[in-house]
């Protein structure tokens, strides 16, 4: 083969490489869509809009929040999964949309695990198990003894079927060998109100929801389903500290992109998310809500989410919970 025949090929390859490099350097080239399953005004929507101006400043493009509530998150998850994998679509999803939904009996048209790459953490939280103060129970061992001495199951309230509260109540009963009857409510507020008045004995919720009931003394926090104690409840031990092992049920919300999104774009997104999440007006919201946050690069974020999601998937199998069709 003549050398002259190789020149056009080398020239073409050089142009392709230059084009790829230019695309990586110039991304993003248009507004970025941020899809969430939360309704406007919901807690996830609030965080999306808190992050929005800081992400815009870092990425140099408008961030357009799109609320797609319904079908337990399947509508938003499907829309995000079917979007172009070019880095211009972000999905703010939780352990539900990114794993559990496929096991709960909800019809989904996307693969919660295979169709997404996680690029950054928004917020994580540890649920708290609380008891009506009139029972005089102060610790998890005391609760277990009380439940085992009863002939009837203990009522545990929470917000709906197959929610975090439901899994917390059911998993606690399985791990402690006790009998529990889950009582679903439309939201955590009426569940906590009934627990405070003694209509149900137990309730599970996050600190931001239950703080007024704890401060009034009507509900006693018995244990945190986390790796560590909550900074706002330093005297409330974890489940592990009280003998209930391997029951860390960390709720999370993360940013994800459709699988196949260029890694260079994923890294830039991760860097922008880190800066947005650490901005004072965002971090103050996380701390006041009793949430937790970890600075993690792209690989650390993906490994962390995979580990936490695996725990949730195991809990679904262990409890056998399904959504009502």
Image (spheres, rainbow, N blue to C red):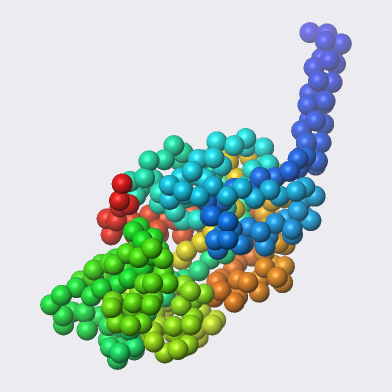
* Residue at image location 41% in from the left, 40% down from the top: 108
Q: How many marks?
A: 0
Q: Is residue 32 left or right of residue 256?
A: right
Viewed as shown, does residue 262 lie left or right of 42?
right
Residue 228 visible in rendering: no
Judged left or right of residue 121, residue 241 is left
Query: Is residue 163 in sight in this rendering?
Result: yes
* Residue positioned 43% across, 47% down in the render: 71
Task: Return the x and y of residue 156 as percentages of the image width and height.
Answer: 30, 72
The x, y position of residue 267, in whole percent, is: 69, 50
Quarter the N terminus occupies: top right
Residue 38: x, y in percent? 53, 55
Q: Residue furthest top?
A: 1
Position above or below: 254 against 142: above
Q: Residue at x 54, y 47 (%)?
A: 68
153 or 126: which is nearer to us?
153
Identity of the residue drawn at 41% across and 66% down: 187
The image quadrant of residue 290 is bottom right
Question: Looking at the image, is 150 positioned above or below residue 65?
Answer: below
In the picture shown, does residue 147 fall above or below 122? below
């Amino acid at each position: 083969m003549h050398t002259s025949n190789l020149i056009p090929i080398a020239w073409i390859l050089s142009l392709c490489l230059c084009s790829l490099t230019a695309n990586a350097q110039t991304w993003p080239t248009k507004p970025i869509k941020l899809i969430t399953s939360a309704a406007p005004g919901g807690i996830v929507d609030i965080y999306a809009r808190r992050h929005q101006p800081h992400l815009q400043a870092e990425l140099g493009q408008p961030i357009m929040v799109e609320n797609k509530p319904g079908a337990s998150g399947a509508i938003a998850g499907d829309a995000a999964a079917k979007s172009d994998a070019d880095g211009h679509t972000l999905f703010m999803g939780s352990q539900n949309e990114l794993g559990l939904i496929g096991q709960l009996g909800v019809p989904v048209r996307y693969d919660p695990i295979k169709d997404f790459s996680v690029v950054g953490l928004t917020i994580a939280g540890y649920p708290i198990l609380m008891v009506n103060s009139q029972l005089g129970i102060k610790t998890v061992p005391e609760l277990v003894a009380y439940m085992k001495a009863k002939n009837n199951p203990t009522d545990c309230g929470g917000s709906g079927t197959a929610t975090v509260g439901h899994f917390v109540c059911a998993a606690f009963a399985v791990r402690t060998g006790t009998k529990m009857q889950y009582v679903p409510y439309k939201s955590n507020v009426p569940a906590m109100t009934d627990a405070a008045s003694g209509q149900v004995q137990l309730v599970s919720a996050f600190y931001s929801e239950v703080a007024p009931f704890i401060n009034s003394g009507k509900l006693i926090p018995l244990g945190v389903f986390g790796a560590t104690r909550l900074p706002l409840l330093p005297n409330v031990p974890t489940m592990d500290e009280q003998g209930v092992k391997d029951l860390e049920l960390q709720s999370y919300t993360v940013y994800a992109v459709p699988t196949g999104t260029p890694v260079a774009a994923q890294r830039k997104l991760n860097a922008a998310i880190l800066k947005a999440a650490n901005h004072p007006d965002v971090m103050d919201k996380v701390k006041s809500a009793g949430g937790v946050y970890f600075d993690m690069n792209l690989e650390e974020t993906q490994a962390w989410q995979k580990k936490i999601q695996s725990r949730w998937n195991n809990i679904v199998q262990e409890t056998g919970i399904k959504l009502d069709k």
